[in-house]
Each structure stands twice: as structure tokens, then as C-alpha cells.
Amino acid sequence: MRYLPNQGQSQDGYARFNAGSRPPDDQLPKSMVDLLLERDRLAGASSAAVVVARDLEAAALDLAAKTEDDATAAVAARAGKPIPKPVAAAKLTEDRAEAARNVTAQAAAFQATTLDCAALGNDLKDQLDNNVAQAKVKAHAQIEALADKLASAIEAAISAGAAHAWLSGGLYEPRALVQIREVLPATRTQDIGYYLPGASFTVREIITNAALTTLEES
């Protein structure tokens, strides 16, 4: 079935799983929806983990930790107590290591879920191919009938107008004809607008082809 892609996918081809780049949930099997929602959650968790890790990289935190440890050491020295080991600096180092592990874990989980989405998509497509083919045949027949009904209504209106024009001495032309530049005004300034500028096409042909070619394989 033909379609016009919106925006280019990422180089790894997985951007199609992102919210806003995929079909609505009610058009997808529940198993895929559940997996996509899990991927969405992991995407958010992964982004949040990166933000936390980045915030902990600030040099000001090192200075603050050193200042805190130095102050604690000075208090101990004045009290005649043993100088304690740096606590704030050690805690900062530990927090940074934990944040880095979290970034790695969240990224790995997100990547694994993305691969699962791709694998499930392939499996579901194979399972649903027959159903989709049958639905396509049914849709083709329904759309063809609707296109015929619309075209017939337009042709009847044009024919009636042609008969009225003939009564007053005009040329009898009952066919519903249009030029491509009339159907698509935007093409008037493009090369396509000058393709066979004098040629006309029947409204039935335009309606039917526009409706049914979208169901053809690209």
C-alpha cells in the first residue's frame, strides 16, 4: 500500500517506534502497544539518567565537597580530635559512579526493548499479512464504489448544465472535464502544471485513480 513518509527516520531505522512516528494504539496489536509503552518509559528514564549524570559533572561540586571536608577537618583539629577522612568528596565520587552505572543500564534496557519492538513488528507483520490482504481487497471494492457514486453525481450535474447551455445555443458537452492545473492550483508555477496544458481529464478518471492508486503497492 502506498504512503508518503513524513520525515526521514534515523540512520538506525528505529525512530519509527517513537511517539508521534507510529500508528495510534488502537491500530496496533496489544502486544506491540505494551512493548512500545515500555520503550517510552525507558526512553524517559534514560534521558533522566543522562541529566543526573551530567549535573554531577559540575566542577563546582568538587569545590563544594572539598570545602565541606576541609571545614570538618578544621573543626576536628581545633577540638584535638583525629582528622576524619574526606566524606563529601567520597560521596560525590560514589554518586558519580552510581549515575554512570544508571546511564549504562537505562541505555542498555532501552536498546534491548527497541530491538524487541523490531522483532515483534516483523513477527506480527507475517502473522497479519493475510488479514491485511483481505481487508485491502474489501477496502478497494468499497472505495471504488464510493468513487463511482461521487463521479456519477458530478457527471449528472455537468450533463444537466450542458443541456441547459445547449438550449440557449451553446455547444453540447456533457462530459465532466478538468485540467490538471485546475485540480491542483499549486502546480501552476511548477513544471507539472505545464504538462499537456491543453489536455483535459475526466473527473471520473481523476477521482477513481486518486482513490485507488493509494491502495497499490509502491
Image (cartoon, grey):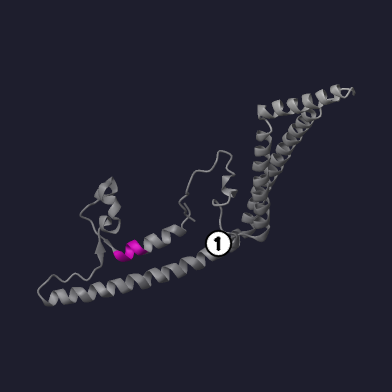
Left or right: residue 199 compared with residue 109:
left
Q: Would residue 195 be visible to someone looking at this image?
A: no
Q: Which percent across, then down, holds residue 108?
A: 71, 40
Main secondary structure of the magenta stretch:
helix
Point out the stretch of residues depicted in magenta.
203-207
Q: Would residue 217 be visible to someone looking at this image?
A: yes
Numbered disc total = 1
Q: Residue at x 23, y 74 (%)?
A: 159
Residue 213's quadrant in the figure? bottom left
Q: Which percent across, then down, holds residue 2?
A: 47, 54
Q: Which percent across, then down, holds residue 32?
A: 65, 56
Q: Which percent across, then down, holds residue 116?
A: 68, 48
Q: Residue at x 30, y 71 (%)?
A: 154
Residue 126's quadrant in the figure? bottom right
Residue occupying the far left of the picture: 169
Q: Residue at x 33, y 63 (%)?
A: 205
141 in relation to 106, above or below: below
Residue type at mark 1: give it.
Ala
Left or right: residue 195 compared with residue 6:
left
Work out whether residue 97 or residue 199 is closer to the camera in this orientation and state it.
97
- Queried whether the magenta region covers residue 204, the answer comes back as yes
Left or right: residue 171 compared with residue 154:
left
Q: Residue at x 46, y 57 (%)?
A: 216
Q: Which residue is mark 1?
A: 133
119 in relation to 138, above or below: above
Numbered disc 1: secondary structure:
helix
Left or right: residue 210 compared with residue 173:
right
- Queried whether the magenta region covers residue 206, the answer comes back as yes
Work out whether residue 101 or residue 113 is closer to the camera in this orientation and state it.
101
